[in-house]
Amino acid sequence: MTMQIADGVSLAPPEATARAHKAAARNNLRTEPRAVRIAIITLAIAFLSMFVVLPLVLVFAQAFSRGILAYLAALAEPEALAAIKLTLVVAAISVSLNLVFGLVASWAIAKFEFTGKTFLITLIDLPFSVSPVISGLVFVLLFGAQGYFGGWLRDHDIQVLFAVPGIALATTFVTFPFVARALIPLMQEQGTQEEEAAISLGASGLQTFFRVTLPNIKWGVLYGVLLCNARAMGEFGAVSVVSGHIRGETNTMPLLVEILYNEYQFVAAFAIASLLAMLALITLIAKTILERHLDEGHDASDH
Amino acid sequence: MSAIAARRRTLPGFGLTMGLTLTWLSVIILIPLAALFLRSTELSFDQFWGILSSRRTLNALRVSFGLAFAAACVNLVMGSIIVWALVRYRFPGRRIFDAIVDVPFALPTAVAGVALTSLFAEKGWLGAPLAALGIKVAFTPLGIFVAMIFIGIPFVVRTVQPVLQDLDPEIEEAAGSLGASRWQTIIRVILPSLAPALLTGLALAFARAVGEYGSVIFIAGNLPNVSEIAPLLIVIRLSEFRYADATAIAVIMLVVSFVIIFAVNRLQRWAQNRIPAH
């Protein structure tokens, strides 16, 4: 924030130059010699380029290494189409479940005071710190053949593991905190005054939520859904444990990337991977735009 | 205070939303995690200890925890340098590099895994020059280390960045005008203010790297006792239907994660108490 102010000073009209000189003198106490500055910037750029930019570039370079036709052919394979469809279905299920949960939980947590609130938030955050593999394992222990509900499910002929319900459950577990964590701080900051006004004017609880609260948190909702969706579509470890890798049936896009890669079908593997990489890039761009909206809302409520 | 509490209660829906929250939380998160702990109690202590002290398990845990810690330390140093460059300096492409920091968060782990493997394979863009120097990265423990560095970068950067941005410039100016050298100011004034955030970033990067699966298994080589990570051993035991083994390893890893969350929570409380509210 302070740096934005500093930028403003340097762009200020002539009458402000005296102030700018003073600021520059003060800034000398807060900066390093030119050589050090250049070394630090170079190191940061080199590190990010090597570890982050290069892998990203490589995905697209490999995907198009045999030309655009090979790329498109790889994506048109029935296996690829099935994986894309399953990924979309699973993401739709887990994002909508977590969206509803996020709205409900953030209303309870942000709009009311109660003891144990911090603990409850810690519980909601748990999936962030559980290894993806363990997130899948817990559902195997519940619904697998030797699992607690395995016998009952078999008797009733219900397939959870190695089928869409298991994949959706594991994905929901992994993406559980995203929407709630985006909304709780936002709603806490906005307080309860507007809602109280609406209620005292005779609005019902649901009317208040949809007409007052929801418009105020819409960017936060989008933000949470965006991150939740990116993780849901890209989840690998948890889904890998519960999916059973049945080709054309229970392979999501990340799982298909693994299979194709291990079969040395690099163009096909990186073609699917490039779709997921594009999803990641679009998510990041949208996230940056949304953060700007959220910051504006934040500033507006400050003044 | 009581007036506020009374007013808050005028909003409807607390019982309903809290009930739904607790129910859903239990169904999706708490009961599944409880099942894991319940399973582990079916093992006797000797069985549990036997699984954990087997050579292969110990080596997998050593690989996961050791390399995750080493990678988190690299992230701490490089993350600090990146934060400093992004917050304190102006350079072309700064905003783009700022956004790029989040790529390891957003890129699906399997995609990161295959990309890093191809990049560091013996004929890869970075693997070839490294191989010429006699350094083999892909399919060795060094590959695991590289993948863990990749996924840990955003944790340190994103925890430290806001703290450095909000740091009161006057403290540094005071130190400078009182005759402290720039280096002294950084070590004695700035570093202590950043310490809680740096430690939090280190802990988060470590926790993520310990449990990481997708971006590691492609590049790891997965040689038992050498380059086999603990999450992979869980998957292998599951595929062999050795549920007890998988459960025991998972419980140990979960307990460690919970200790880390607890430590991070304490760190953040410590940081809040140290820095007076603005």
Image (cartoon, rainbow, N blue to C red):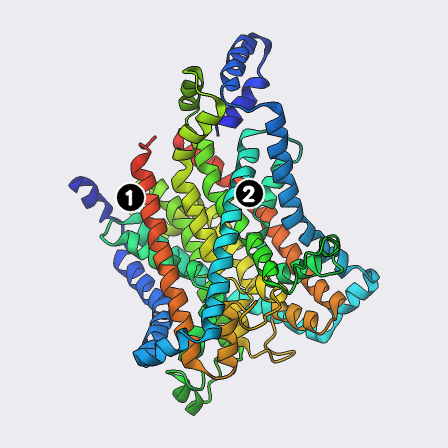
Q: Which residue is the site of mark 1?
A: A196
Task: Examine the rendered structure and indicate whether residue B42 appears above or below residue A23.
Answer: below
Say above or below: B244 vs A292: below
Q: Out of A95 and B143, give the one closest to the viewer.
A: B143
Disc 2 residue type? Met
For label 2, count other residues whose C-alpha is less than 10 Å away and answer few (under 14), some (14-19) or many (20+).
many
A107 on left or right of B120: left
Mark 2 → mark 1, Cα distance in angstroms: 48 Å
Assess whether mark 1 and mark 2 are in contact (beta carbons under 8 angstroms).
no
Give the left or right position of residue B196, taking residue A262 as reference: left
Residue A222, percent across and down?
A: 50, 51
Q: Determine whether the residue tagged by mark 1 lies in a helix, strand or loop.
A: helix
- The residue that disc 2 covers is B78
Residue at left offset 59%, top offset 57%: B147
Please, what secondary structure does the residue beneath circle 2 have? helix
Rendered-image quadrant of the C terminus of chain B:
top left
Task: Please name the residue shown 33% across and 34% down the image.
Answer: B275
Camera-side residue: A206 or A144?
Answer: A144
Tally of marks: 2
Residue closest to the far front: B134
